[in-house]
Amino acid sequence: MNDSEVPAVGKQVIVACAFIHHNFDGVEKIFMPKRAATKKFMPSVFELPGGQLKF
């Protein structure tokens, strides 16, 4: 199952994430998307973009 709302208890999960930043006219910006308020797991939390990898 590939659902971030279901904990992977006892399973190895390989994930990747990105730290995205850019300098806009001397102002350093970081891309931090916010999870939807409707998510069951960690709603409305800012996180790095990423996801699970398949072997």
Image (tube, rainbow, N blue to C red):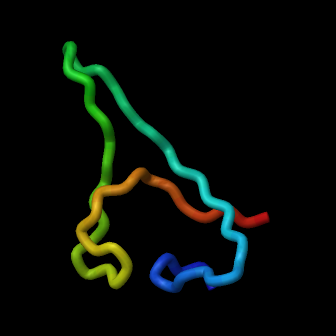
Q: Residue 34, relative to residue 18: is it above or below?
A: below
Residue 48 as seen in the image, left or right of residue 38: right
Residue 51 as seen in the image, left or right of residue 39: right
Q: In the image, residue 20 lies at what x, y percent? A: 41, 37
For the C terminus, the quadrant is: bottom right
- Residue at image position (72%, 71%) is 12
Q: Residue 54, relative to residue 4: is it above or below?
A: above
Q: In the image, residue 52 lies at what x, y percent? A: 61, 64
Instruction: Return the residue found at the far right.
Output: 55
Residue 39 as seen in the image, left or right of residue 16: left
Q: Quadrant of residue 51?
A: bottom right
Q: In the image, residue 13 lies at what x, y percent? A: 67, 69
For the N terminus, the quadrant is: bottom right
Instruction: Return the residue found at the far front.
Output: 10
Q: In the image, residue 49 lies at what x, y percent? A: 44, 53
- Residue at image position (32%, 42%) is 31
Q: Quadrant of residue 9?
A: bottom right
Q: Residue 43, relative to residue 19: is it above or below?
A: below
- Residue at image position (72%, 66%) is 54
Which is more toward the observer, 53 or 6? 6
Number of labels in the image equals: 0
Q: Quadrant of residue 46?
A: bottom left
